[in-house]
């Protein structure tokens, strides 16, 4: 239900407004941005992600070998390149694998492994192989950063995470444009089934400039990935809409706020799938709302009282740090 | 969305009230409208009370509809029947049989209970300007001319905030009414004094259907002394888009095994009232694959909810919904 005074369910922590200075090349910018994202994810005070194993392209080893952005090296599988396995407080793991050419540094392979089961520890030429039947590769050499479109430019990296580690959100800007968007989200109000959904986590890494936290990107049926009953599948975000059309209620009349509240508001976001075997609604995102398309990317809520409690990234509203506006450049 | 559904209110039920075929459409309408009014009056807690009424031969205080023959339709200033019901919250509804045919009705919702007069057998009371809204001046009964028997169902919350009417004739839904107090109402500089919306289906394809809930005018309300129409909302996919319960036509949720439902809201595109306003209480949008009148859940306590066309509403937990 749209609300202008959003109510948070979780406690959030913020590594946001991190300046990302322009470097001398797109490649160095990509290195810096991914390093900043990982450093932010591992830098939270509570339930931080922990780098369990990693490769800096020179060697594989325990812990975080990404000491600086120079340790984030792209190259194709079989050649020396970087990767990192991050472990969450809940025991899930994410693999970022830079297994693409330098020219394709906007590409990544990302694997979400809810059981943290891997067949090996990898090497400096190959990332670890997840145990069959337990993980999902939701980005295989796909675009994680549409930055290349903007050329060499500085920007900002924002990473937000709940203190219990259930939800991690990444938004990175280059030249004032949102170029990277990632979500690692534990759903709530999950539909109960005969077979329990052991880890109701959905992951998203948008791959096109038009998709970053937009209706198109959140709504595409190949946007979110998850896994239920040991099968991976894709799903889509949902929200409150008119019944015919349908149109999200926060975008019902373009360009104008709610006439009663005077604000643009937002509607809670759910998750559903049309994939055979997983059809129907599965649950709801926590502390996430769909906002008006008329709101400028990076605007914050509310407009009175304690400012900056929430920020809107394209069409998605998420908790913000209550201290500062969203910096985009 | 919930599967199973979670009830927010306490409900009471005057349901499964059988009605024999009247022999004519007029008698069917007379009997059904009186059954509706009697049902609304008959709840144990917070019942509607008839404050004024007319039988066409007599107008005055209290409930004058002693039998169905007291429900008489006539147009203009010709003697006809009407009844004014007062709610525990002080709102009033006027059912006015001021048309030639019995399938049409004028219905006025008056949140302030302010009227200019007490009416007569020739004219129903006139609501004070700027306070009421006449949201129905056409068809309320859609069964046509064939006289048939059926069932009348009235459900109301114990606090009187929500009243729902569903009437079946020959097994099909032929009359549908909602008088609903919304919750989670959007706050504004001018408070929405009485966030009540009213709905009456006016053709066979509109009774509690997506079409009926969406058509403009479909659902009426009043804010800041202005009446306007709105429409129901529910959870939909972002791209497509499709209401979530209809996402995969004809199949239940693959995880839960059930059809489930999504909560419903209310929004308007009318200038001055644009945007979402609030949420219906204990109302869900169900799958189009469900047969009208099906019940939820299958176990362990049956009949807690029923689906009337596309709308899921609490049911009495005691007996299946009967349609004939």
Image: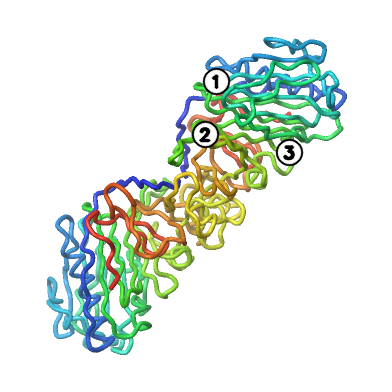
What is the spatial separation of the Cα atoms under label 1 and label 2, in whole angstroms?
13 Å
- SS at circle 1: loop
Q: Check contact, mark 1 vs mark 2: CB within 8 A.
A: no
Sequence order check: which comes first, mark 1 or mark 2? 1
Rendered image: mark on residue B90? 1
Image coordinates of residue B209 in percent, x first then y, are 65, 43
Task: Write down the chain letter for disc 2.
Answer: B
Between B312 and A21, the residue placed more toward the observer is A21
- SS at circle 2: loop
Between A264 and B10, the residue placed more toward the observer is A264
Rendered image: mark on residue B202? 3
In the image, taking residue B63 as reference, residue B22 lies left or right, namely: right
Image coordinates of residue A140 in percent, x first then y, are 36, 77
Q: Say which of marks 2 and 3 sits in front.
A: 2
Task: Write down the chain letter for disc 3.
Answer: B
Residue at x 61% of width, y 41% of height = B228
Which residue corresponds to mark 2? B195
Image coordinates of residue A102 in percent, x first then y, are 28, 89
């Amino acid at each position: 239900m749209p609300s202008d005074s959003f109510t948070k369910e979780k406690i959030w922590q913020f590594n946001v407004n991190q300046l990302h200075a322009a470097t001398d090349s797109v490649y160095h910018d990509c290195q810096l941005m991914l390093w900043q994202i990982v450093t932010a994810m591992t830098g939270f005070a509570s339930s931080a992600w922990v780098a369990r194993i990693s490769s800096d392209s020179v060697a594989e080893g325990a812990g975080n070998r990404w000491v600086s952005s120079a340790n984030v090296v792209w190259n194709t599988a079989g050649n020396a390149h970087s990767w990192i396995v991050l472990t969450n407080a809940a025991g899930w793991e994410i693999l970022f694998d830079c297994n693409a050419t330098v020219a394709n540094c906007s590409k990544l392979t990302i694997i979400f492994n809810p059981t943290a089961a891997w067949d090996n520890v990898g090497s400096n030429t190959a990332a670890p192989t997840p145990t069959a039947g337990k993980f999902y590769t939701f980005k295989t050499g796909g675009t994680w950063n549409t930055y290349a479109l903007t050329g060499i430019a500085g920007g900002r990296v924002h990473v937000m995470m709940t203190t219990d580690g259930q939800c991690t959100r990444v938004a990175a800007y280059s030249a004032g444009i949102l170029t990277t968007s990632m979500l690692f989200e534990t759903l709530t109000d999950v539909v109960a089934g005969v077979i329990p959904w052991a880890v109701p986590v959905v992951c998203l890494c948008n791959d096109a400039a038009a998709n970053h936290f937009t209706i198109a990107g959140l709504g595409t049926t190949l946007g979110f990935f998850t896994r239920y009953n040991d099968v991976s599948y894709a799903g889509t975000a949902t929200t409150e809409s008119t019944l015919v059309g349908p149109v999200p209620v926060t975008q019902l009349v373009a360009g104008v706020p709610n006439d009663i509240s005077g604000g643009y508001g937002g509607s809670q976001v759910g998750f559903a799938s049309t994939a055979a075997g997983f059809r129907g609604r599965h649950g709801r995102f926590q502390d996430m709302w769909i906002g008006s398309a008329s709101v400028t990317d990076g605007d914050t809520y509310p407009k009175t009282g304690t400012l900056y409690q929430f920020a809107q990234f394209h069409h998605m509203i998420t908790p913000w740090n209550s201290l500062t506006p969203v910096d985009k450049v | 969305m919930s599967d199973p559904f979670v009830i927010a209110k306490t409900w009471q039920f005057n349901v499964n009230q059988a009605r024999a075929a009247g022999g004519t459409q007029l008698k069917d309408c007379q009997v059904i409208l009186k059954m509706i009014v009697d049902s609304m009056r008959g709840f144990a807690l917070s019942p509607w009370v008839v404050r004024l009424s007319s039988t066409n031969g007599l107008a005055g205080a209290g409930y004058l509809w002693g039998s169905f023959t007291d429900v008489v339709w006539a147009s203009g200033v010709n003697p006809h029947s009407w009844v004014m019901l007062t709610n525990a919250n002080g709102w009033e509804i006027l059912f006015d049989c001021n048309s030639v045919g019995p399938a049409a009705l004028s219905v006025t919702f008056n949140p302030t209970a302010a009227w200019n007069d007490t009416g007569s057998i020739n004219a129903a009371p006139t609501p004070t300007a700027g306070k009421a809204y006449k949201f129905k001046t056409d068809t309320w009964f859609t069964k046509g001319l064939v006289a048939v028997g059926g069932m009348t169902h009235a459900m109301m919350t114990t606090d009187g905030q929500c009243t729902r009417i569903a009437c079946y004739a020959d097994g099909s839904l032929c009359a549908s009414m909602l008088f609903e107090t919304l919750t989670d109402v959007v706050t504004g500089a001018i408070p929405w004094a009485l966030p009540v919306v009213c709905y009456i289906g006016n053709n066979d394809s509109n009774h509690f259907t997506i079409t009926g809930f969406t058509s403009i005018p479909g659902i009426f309300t009043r804010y800041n002394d202005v009446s306007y129409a709105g429409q129901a909302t529910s959870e939909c996919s972002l791209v497509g888009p499709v209401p979530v319960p209809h996402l995969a036509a004809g199949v239940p949720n693959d995880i839960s095994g059930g059809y489930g439902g999504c909560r419903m809201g209310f929004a308007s595109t009318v200038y001055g009232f644009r945007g979402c306003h609030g949420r219906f209480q204990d109302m869900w949008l169900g799958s189009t694959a469900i047969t009208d009148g099906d019940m939820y859940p299958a176990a362990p306590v049956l009949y807690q909810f029923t689906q009337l066309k596309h709308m899921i509403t609490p049911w009495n937990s005691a007996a299946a919904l009967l349609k004939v």
